[in-house]
Amino acid sequence: MTELNVQADKMDVFLKGVWKENPVFVMLLGMCPVLAVTNSVINALVMGIATTFVLILSNLLVSSLRKLIPKQVRIATYILIIATFVTVADYAIKAVSLEVHKSLGAFISLIVVNCIILGRAEAFASKNSIGRSVLDGLGMGSGFTFAVLCLGIVREVLGNGTFAGFSLFGPDFQPLIIMILPGGAFFVLGAYLMFFNWLKERKKINEKIAEPDMAMAD
């Protein structure tokens, strides 16, 4: 494989998680934290960073040990590895900001059972090299962070009139309280899913239109 092909492969592994196989908008994974903690930008960002941290390091360790872990206990081993890094993330968040830690509550610990992380450990890291596994974790984590930030920005701006705690519209703004309630999360997520499906269908239509033109050019 040439150097150019290697770089293209690395880029493809990373971009799959960010866009082509986005864990939230495409694969619809990890819905519990996506709906629960995206009522503010800060909460969404911290959850995204914590999940990315766990994804990268768990993928790295699983890939490093993939030839040593017996198949019979691989899932239990993956959960143990993930739980270790989740504990590190939990203590780090608590040390940086008790307020954010309280806001996220049990959802930090629930990263352990996030199907995105366990799924990537089983489907990718256990079958690929360390470098590719780290890139996969970074891509999936970035895609997840992008998704929760998309929801967090809309919900906080419309529900509180603020962005990361800073007021945007002044005292006369009438917030849409439903946006920071659980129902608002479903509305915003549904709107994003509809938008991304529309983009996907539009791309397919454009490709079909372009096919006859390419055939004529040949």
Image (cartoon, rainbow, N blue to C red):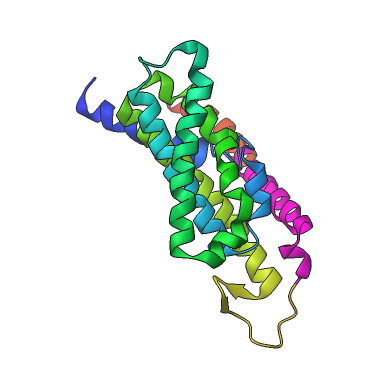
Considering depth in this image, is 45 or 78 the residue closer to the camera?
78
The answer, for residue 13, to whether it is visible in the render is no
Q: Residue at x 48, y 24 (%)?
A: 77
Q: Position of residue 115 (x, y in %)?
A: 59, 33
Residue occupying image coordinates x 36% and y 36% = 135
Location of the C terminus by quadrant is: top left
The image position of residue 209, as x and y in percent, is 58, 34
- Quarter of the image for residue 3 reads top left
How many marks can you see?
A: 0
Between 202 and 124, the residue placed more toward the observer is 124
Say whether residue 188 is magenta.
yes
Vertical placement of 87 versus 70: above or below?
A: below
Quadrant housing residue 9: top left
Q: Nearer the viewer, residue 199 or 180?
A: 180
Of the 4 image quadrants, the one containing the N terminus is: top left
Q: Return the x and y of residue 95 as percentages of the image width and height.
A: 44, 61
Q: Is residue 73 above or below residue 138?
A: above
Answer yes or no: is residue 150 visible: yes
Work out which residue is located at the far bottom of the displayed protein and give it.
Answer: 171
The quarter holding residue 5 reads top left
| Vertical order, 142 against 134 (above or below) | below
Dominant SS of magenta comes to: helix
Q: Which residues are magenta?
A: 176-200
Residue 211 versus residue 114 in the image, above or below: above
Left or right: 85 with respect to 34? left
Tell me: 67 left or right of 16.
left
Residue name at image x 60 percent, y 61 percent: 102
- Asked if the magenta segment contains residue 23, the reply would be no
Residue 205 appears at what percent x and percent y? 62, 36
